[in-house]
Amino acid sequence: MTQTIAPRVRTVVLLLLAAACALLAGAGPASAHAAVTGSDPGQGAVVDKAPARITLTFSEQVALSDDSLRVLDPEGKRVDTAKPAGVTGTTYAVPLHSGLPDGTYTVAYQVVSADSHPVAGAYTFSIGAPSKTSVSVSGQSTDDGVVGWLYGFGRYVSYAGFIVMAGGAAFVLACWRRGAGVRPVQRFVVSGWVALTASTLALLLLRGSFTGSGKVSDIFDLSLLGQVLQTKSGAALVSRLLLLAAAALFIAVLFGAYARPSPTTTPPDGASRRQPDPSEDAEEKRDLTFGLSIGGVVVAAGLAASWAMSEHASVGLQAGIAMPVDVLHLLAVAAWLGGLGALLVALYRAPADTPVDAPAVRRFSQVAFGSVLALIATGTYQSWRQLGTWSAFTDTRYGQLLLAKIALVVVLVGVAWISRRWTGRLARTVPVEASAVREKERVGAGADGAGETAVVGDGETAVVGDGDAPAEVEGDTGLDTDEQPGTESAGPEPADSERAAQLARQQAARDAAQRKRARDADPNRFGLRRSVLAEAGIAVVLLAVTTVLTQTEPGRTEQEAKAATAASASSSADEGASGALTLNMPFDTGGEDGKGIVTIDVDPARVGGNEMHVYVERPNGRAFDIPEVKVEFTLKAKDIGPLPVVPDHIATGHWSANGVQIPMAGDWQVDVTVRTSDIDEVTVSKNAQIG
């Protein structure tokens, strides 16, 4: 039976690895986690005169380098004059040369979002009238190419290594302590540590090129590595390496002193020495188990925090709550899927004399059940935090991937329920099997005085264990033909010792083979092995989907960007149709419920008196009230302003002011100050032609 199972195992593993690689390869370049929610001039806009600067507003704070914002003329020459800098909150600007000629200009940006993912793109605007341009704006993503693929694969391996190492060790400590001395289980856990360490080093080297040029030649650039070490992502990777050193010590103790049986010594003269007190050994074992459990949880939580502190959980809504929740989520995944992998190894590779028993499988079933409950709770919170609305499940790529992940988890839980049934059946058959084995050993030991004949080799047979008489060997016994029974001998001949050792080894091998065949022939154990193999296969694909999910722009951010783009297009259309001015400006005060869009309507947007309306909406388009909103108009070209306007509150999310005086036509800067709490306030700006 084992000969037919092994090829199936290899085939299934290869197919699942191929599926995981296909998912990683299909992650695509749309991996940005901060999105552009506004720009001035806007995408495709045609302005009458050259702007003094270019501003971009992102959905979250980003990290800038010297070349993060570049403005290129129609011939591809740079026309920006200084390093980009932050203006307010999430708005960044770069100054331009004065007196730029008419034509189409390209704005290219390449930044790193607060959750460590690179964001790149480009758009065009025109001065005077559109013209031909030699600048290509396609293929701007840094996730594209060899470096991006390697970085994504390294992330997958790091997640897998953590799950295998942490989950495998937890399986040994919590479910099957005898497994600490089983070599295949040891190799399984150590392979997780090696994979996580190697992938962390690789990510540290790839990081500079991944967030920069994307060139393979920059992977070993030490100057880029030095820059990476100064970032939040670099600090997280270095912290992970330090914690892996502690994890190596933990693994050494787990598979060293913890796996070693209690020592027993015998004096050289053969006299028996007092054996250690079993109660003392048990107490020492309990203390070591407790120490390893506490140390293992601390190290595993620290490793999980190295992801939480630098990715999705560290930015956005309720980051202080999201980070501990993310750590708990990763630990639950490791306990479930890593323990599942260790159980699979134990079921297929554990030696016949140390099989994984039903109580260990039952304990793991309880651990897995608790992990699933933790995953449901933490996953629900994470889904709400990253999506925000039900429509984001189907309207965004993040939501679609999340639906696929939920479906896989449901299937995995269903297969786990089948495994739980096999576990119950196996537990009921274990007492019967144990009594049968004890009876066989009693009979084989010669309790009824009968010996057991076995084929040894070269046509010889051995009678092993006939009870009262010593074992006899038919054939060549190694004694001289002149030697008679009862003749005193100085001692056993060397041939006799070798033959006895050979017989003992062969008998032990036969016993082990018989036990393994009996174990594998058990339909309950065979059913459990198949269901656990199916669970592990689904887990491989689930991990690939999760890795792609962490590289995908959250649904909440994607919807905010879409809303801002649509509002900008709508305002441009309204302005051209009626002459009234409509400005849409996304804002983020950084506090709770601090994100939204403020809309300014100025009618008829001309010199003299105007009517102004201010609307404040959430990213999903729902109006909401804030403590204060103020508006200022500034005409920098004529040194006029700022002219303050404090509108009156009319309705939910609606303020109004009449008789707003615009003294002169020109390119006015409209500044809107939004306060969402006593301490959370931000000012957003936009230029508009009035009069």
Image (cartoon, grey):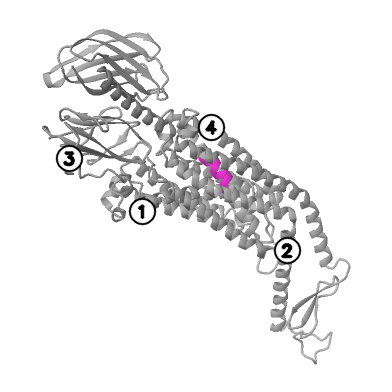
User: Closer to the camera: disc 1 or disc 2?
Assistant: 1
Is 315 positioned to the left or the right of 390 in the image? Answer: left
Q: Which residue is mark 3?
A: 73
x 53%, y 41%: residue = 405
Label 4 amino acid? Thr
Q: Residues within 10 Å of mark 1 (few under 14, many from 20)?
A: few
Q: Secondary structure at mark 2?
A: helix
Q: Counting residues from the N terminus, which is met first, the one under dot 4 or under dot 3?
A: 3
Q: Secondary structure at mark 4?
A: helix
Q: Residues within 10 Å of mark 3 (few under 14, many from 20)?
A: many
Q: Which residue is mark 4?
A: 380
Residues in magenta? 330-338
Q: Which residue is mark 1?
A: 146
Label 2 amino acid? Arg
Distance from the alpha carbon under mark 1 to that under mark 2: 48 Å
Is 233 positioned to the left or the right of 64 in the image? Answer: right
The quadrant the C terminus occupies is top left
Q: Which numbered marker is on residue 216?
A: none
Label 3 amino acid? Asp
Q: Which numbered marker is on residue 517?
A: 2
Give x and y (percent) for residue 52.
16, 29
Q: Counting residues from the N terminus, which is met first, the one under dot 4 or under dot 1?
A: 1
The quadrant the N terminus occupies is bottom right
Distance from the alpha carbon under mark 3 to that under mark 2: 77 Å
Give x and y (percent) for residue 20.
50, 51
